[in-house]
Image (cartoon, coloured by chain):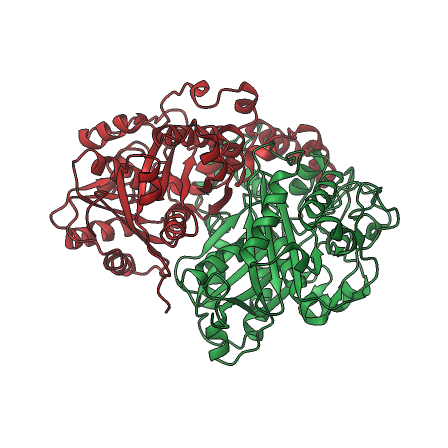
Chain colours: A red, B green
């Protein structure tokens, strides 16, 4: 294999976070430290609990009501958090910087119109000609703009419109793995000198029946109420959380040149996909762990889902890989945010490093169906 | 500079395998024959009832089936066929020696599955999602989880061909196929991988997808005759026609391709992209992002605009796209652009959406290989606002370089430059 032509340090210079833990870095650090149960709602979608996002004042980051109206919640959450990250990185007011800034988003798709779906399904029961009926109702009842609120790449599109981040965007799909790979590709492009600065992140809206449906098929949801991630033996599965996490990553020199504070260094992102069998997750994590060059991290942020088998395997693997480090599960802070889980993990790790509470942090992700990731963050400005 | 590095000292990226599936047929040979003969793959939709629809035509691929007939599974079948052909041509056996970058359509549960859930719930009143959730909890529908999550298509293709590492599933709307190629090029240039399997696939002609585009007034409504509906660059163009298909490209570090003695079909010389924050579906009126994307691709290729021999257009046949694309090409290539042959494959295969950038990349490489620019059908009424040399019957010209454009909703602009030889 050829070696990379160039290797530059990649640092995090801005974080934007919203979840059930609240808004901003301080709220998330407080939730990480407290160990209290995350805010959850077991009633609205009973028997499925969810972790609802804290109320937001959207105008703060999405000033135009017309923009707010054209988005569904998953997009509003993402655009909002992206704005927070840009602000924190000192980039919000720098139109030229944003015009050249690249964007990598990890996302699924957007909300459906539940009322319309229900009405059509009701009507289809007795429709004389179901095909013609479906055509007629979809043509009459679907809002033309709803499509644009559903398309996976339109979170990136809205970030471009609302915040003027128009270098170019790429949207990665594929559940938990997409979040890790968004960070991996973003980090690699900067390290190799292909780009200087990138906004990367993901968002997830858990408070919607269609995603509960897709994950109830397969039996991946824990119910009927919140239990800590590593104590779900009796009700394995995840509890979805609404939220969004965005980060500004840039070359260390680039950050220094514009006097932006480097909060932490994203040293390495390793991901893989292994055929799932007993022991495969542990083996994959061990392999990825060594590829990232992790030493003895002061903390581990785990995006463990709570799903049976793999969660226990990850816990045991971490006990071997980092026996000295406390393991904090994102599911106990934000709930499970699928595509956004890895960005949340890296953001929290960055916050711990920036607060001086850790010098090296490991982030692990094990997708509920596939894909494993390990990420390494360290104090910026120190030797590697 | 070694012959395996470009002017910037980066590894040259060679194309060593191509695979294509479109409504014109399965495989490169059939597609190229139909494309250069000017045969259309667009026809009346028979997959589902079209009664009452404003648009009742598409370039569906009807000779490959899936069970159940849903977009992700159909997209997987197309991708599988295209990838097998491309890898076969590259002469690779066993596990694929590199990464997978895959443009896949966004997926969600479709109407037949919703109906099945509603029936299983057996409620008497109005159907709600609570009923569907109750049916799902019966565990009878668990197989549908994997079918309708976003990562499954790429996961199964990775399994089938033994690609390395975590596969990337991506969307940049209608430029997705080009982005998959760009990601592969970048990974090879970084030295991360020696090879990349880059795929764009789309099998999402179903009632709701069609109606969504129809409600945005994006589709041609000239249903009769179907083959005359897609009219890129013509004055009477009235929207695109949905198409289906897939293309796969095997990209390799040119040095390793040469070392193993495989035939190099052409090179990806450059990739350019630029975001547009003007509007969710419309381009900036000044065309600046399109212009920037074309320029970036040329710069990345180390080519002067005068060195582009032909343009494989995005050419959807919507009033907006074709006008803006013409403006962008004229701005970058200058007066000379009026005489540069330009053609849109979408006149024959429709707009293959997520797959389009990859399908058109494959056709661009065939254009290089054969020195033949395929025609644009239905260019009967030229648009005075588009003063371009639109190719109307297959034209034999020396082609050393092709610019292939891809533009998508959400401000996505991605341009690729292919060359027969290194720049």
In the image: residue B342, left or right of residue B140: right
Position of the C terminus of chain B by quadrant: bottom right
Give x and y (percent) for residue B300: 54, 55
In the image: residue B253, left or right of residue A254: right
- Name the residue at the bottom extreme: B261
Give x and y (percent) for residue A330: 28, 38
- Name above or below for residue A31 compared with residue B323: above
- Name the residue at the right extreme: B380
Q: Nearer the viewer, residue A162 or A233?
A: A162
Q: Residue at x 56, y 53 (%)?
A: B299
- Name above or below for residue A289 compared with residue A199: below
Q: Nearer the viewer, residue B234 or B46?
A: B234
Q: Is residue A321 visible?
A: yes
Q: Is residue B134 visible?
A: no
Q: Residue at x 51, y 47 (%)?
A: B148
- Name above or below for residue A279 compared with residue B30: above
Give x and y (percent) for residue A76: 47, 28
Q: Nearer the viewer, residue B122 or B316?
A: B316
Q: Residue at x 18, y 31 (%)?
A: A33
In the image: residue B348, left or right of residue B287: right
Q: Residue at x 76, y 45 (%)?
A: B317
């Amino acid at each position: 294999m050829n070696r990379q032509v160039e290797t530059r340090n990649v640092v995090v210079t801005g974080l934007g976070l919203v979840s059930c833990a609240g808004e901003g870095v301080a709220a998330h650090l407080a939730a990480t430290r407290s160990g209290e149960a995350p805010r959850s709602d077991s009633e609205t979608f009973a028997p499925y609990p969810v972790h609802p996002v804290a109320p937001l004042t959207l105008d703060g980051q999405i000033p135009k009501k017309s923009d707010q109206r054209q988005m569904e919640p998953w997009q509003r959450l993402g655009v909002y958090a992206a704005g927070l990250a840009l602000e924190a990185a000192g980039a919000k007011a720098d139109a030229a910087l944003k015009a050249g800034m690249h964007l990598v988003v990890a996302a699924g798709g957007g909300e459906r119109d539940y009322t319309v779906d229900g009405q059509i399904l009701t009507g289809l029961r007795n429709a004389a000609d179901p095909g013609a009926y479906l055509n007629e109702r979809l043509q009459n009842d679907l809002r033309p703009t709803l499509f644009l609120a559903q398309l996976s790449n339109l979170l990136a599109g809205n970030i471009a419109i609302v915040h003027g981040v128009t270098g170019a965007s790429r949207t990665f799909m594929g559940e938990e793995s997409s979040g890790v790979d968004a960070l991996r590709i973003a980090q690699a492009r900067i390290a190799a000198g292909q780009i200087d600065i990138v906004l990367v992140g993901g968002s997830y809206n858990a408070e919607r029946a269609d995603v509960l449906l897709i994950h109830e098929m397969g039996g991946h949801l824990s119910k009927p109420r919140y239990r800590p991630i590593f104590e779900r033996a009796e009700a394995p599965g995840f509890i979805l959380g609404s939220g969004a996490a965005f980060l500004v990553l840039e070359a260390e020199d680039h950050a220094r040149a514009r006097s932006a504070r480097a909060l932490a260094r994203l040293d390495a992102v390793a991901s893989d996909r292994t055929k799932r069998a007993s022991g495969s997750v542990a083996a994959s994590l061990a392999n990825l762990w060594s590829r990232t060059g992790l030493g003895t991290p002061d903390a581990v942020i785990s995006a463990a889902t709570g799903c049976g088998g793999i969660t226990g395997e990850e816990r045991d693997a971490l006990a071997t890989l980092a026996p000295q480090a406390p393991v904090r599960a994102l599911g106990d802070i934000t709930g499970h945010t699928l595509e956004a889980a890895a960005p949340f993990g890296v953001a929290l790790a960055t916050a711990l490093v920036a607060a001086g509470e850790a010098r090296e942090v490991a982030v692990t992700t094990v997708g509920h169906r596939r894909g494993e990731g390990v990420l390494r963050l360290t104090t910026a400005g120190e030797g590697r | 500079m070694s012959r395996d590095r470009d002017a910037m000292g980066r590894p040259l990226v060679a194309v060593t395998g191509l695979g294509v599936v479109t409504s014109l047929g399965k495989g490169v040979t059939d597609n190229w024959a139909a494309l250069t003969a000017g045969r259309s793959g667009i026809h009346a939709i028979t997959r589902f009832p079209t009664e009452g629809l404003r648009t009742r035509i598409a370039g569906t691929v009807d000779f490959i089936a899936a069970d159940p007939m849903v977009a992700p599974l159909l997209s997987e079948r197309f991708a599988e066929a295209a990838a097998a052909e491309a890898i076969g041509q590259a002469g690779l056996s066993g596990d694929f020696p590199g990464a997978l970058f895959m443009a896949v359509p966004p997926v969600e549960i479709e109407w037949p599955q919703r109906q099945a859930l509603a029936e299983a719930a057996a409620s008497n009143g109005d159907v709600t999602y609570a009923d569907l959730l109750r049916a799902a909890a019966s565990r009878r529908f668990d197989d549908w989880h994997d079918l309708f999550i976003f990562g499954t298509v790429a996961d199964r293709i990775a399994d089938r061909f033994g690609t390395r590492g975590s596969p990337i599933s991506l969307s940049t709307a209608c430029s997705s196929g080009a982005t998959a190629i760009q990601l592969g090029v970048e990974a090879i240039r970084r030295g991360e991988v020696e090879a990349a399997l880059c795929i764009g696939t789309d099998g999402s002609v179903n009632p709701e997808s069609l109606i969504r585009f129809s409600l945005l007034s994006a589709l041609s409504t000239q249903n009769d005759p179907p083959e005359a509906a897609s009219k890129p660059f013509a004055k009477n163009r009235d929207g695109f026609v949905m198409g289906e298909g897939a293309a796969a490209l095997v990209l390799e570090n040119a040095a390793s391709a040469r070392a193993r003695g495989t035939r190099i079909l052409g090179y990806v010389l450059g990739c350019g992209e630029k975001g547009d924050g003007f509007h969710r579906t419309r381009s900036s009126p000044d065309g600046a992002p399109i212009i920037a994307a074309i320029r970036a691709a040329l710069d990345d290729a180390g080519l002067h605009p005068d060195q582009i021999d032909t343009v494989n257009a995005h050419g959807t046949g919507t009033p907006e796209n074709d006008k803006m694309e013409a403006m962008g090409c004229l701005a970058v290539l200058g007066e000379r652009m009026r005489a540069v042959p330009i053609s849109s494959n979408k006149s024959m295969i429709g707009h293959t959406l997520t797959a389009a950038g990859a399908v058109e990349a494959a056709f661009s490489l065939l254009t290089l290989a054969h020195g033949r620019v395929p025609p644009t059908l239905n260019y009967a009424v030229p648009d005075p606002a588009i003063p371009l040399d639109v190719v109307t019957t297959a034209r034999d010209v020396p082609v050393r370089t092709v610019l292939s454009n891809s533009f998508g909703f959400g401000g996505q602009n991605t341009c690729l430059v292919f060359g027969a030889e290194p720049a």
